[in-house]
Image (cartoon, rainbow, N blue to C red):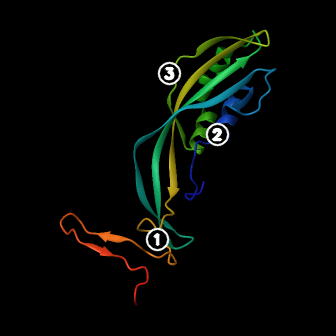
Amino acid sequence: MAADDLIAIPRAAIQDLIGGLSGFACYWDGDAQNYDTTYIRLNVMAYRTIGVDEVREEYDSANDQIKTVLCGLRAFTLNIRVDSYSMNEPGYEILERIRRRLRGGAAKQILREEGLALTKMTNPITDLDELGDNRPIYAAMWDVGMTFAVNEVDTQPQGGGGYIKDAPATGTLTGTQHDPKTLNIDPNPQT
């Protein structure tokens, strides 16, 4: 991944990982889904900053220049909900399968490649008692804590901005409290 890219939560990679670990269709909350089969629904429940973002200077060899990169850590809680229509494989068993497999080598490799880290897997799996279309749904949900790094190239010009040449400056310029003079700004300065 290029350092120029803003890294957001890698939703597609998480969806593929959880779907692959469970063997069932996996959707993000709000996506179209097939309600007639067992499926998994993902949602981000909490999102926060860890510490203070920092500024780093990196050398860009392609453009032969120094670029400023803003870096920080973010933490989020991933809510995984399973709705199963099969009494033989209820939601809590599917979630337990996901919990065990998240610690495996393949899952760790995918998480590492996407810049994700597991932080909390000790939350209990909650069994839900629901009905859908007059059928029992063997649903359960589980929250997983994760972190990832955010990197963004600072594209603002030095000094925080510029000015528009064609816009005339009008009004007054007031000094500080120790030098309280007021000057008129001439919209047509003499050069």
Q: Nearer the viewer, mark 3 or mark 2?
A: 2
Residue 20 in view (yes/no)? no
Q: Quadrant of the C terminus?
A: bottom left
Marks 3/2 in contact by CB < 8 Å: the verdict is no
Comparing 158 with 84, the one in front is 158
- The residue to which callout 2 is attached is 11
**Looking at the image, which residue is at 45% across and 48% down?**
72
- The residue to which callout 3 is attached is 122
Q: Nearer the viewer, mark 2 or mark 1?
A: 1
Q: Nearer the viewer, mark 1 or mark 3?
A: 1
Q: Residues within 10 Å of mark 2 (few under 14, many from 20)?
A: some
Residue 27 in view (yes/no)? yes
Residue type, numbered disc 2 = Arg
> Is 169 above or below relative to 84?
below
Work out whether mark 2 precedes mark 1 in sequence or the reverse, and give the earlier one: 2
Q: Quadrant of the N terminus?
A: bottom right
Q: Which mark is residue 162?
A: 1
Measured from the top left, where is residue 44 in percent x and y? 58, 33
What is the C-alpha distance between the residues marked 3 and 2? 22 Å
What is the C-alpha distance between the residues marked 1 and 3? 51 Å
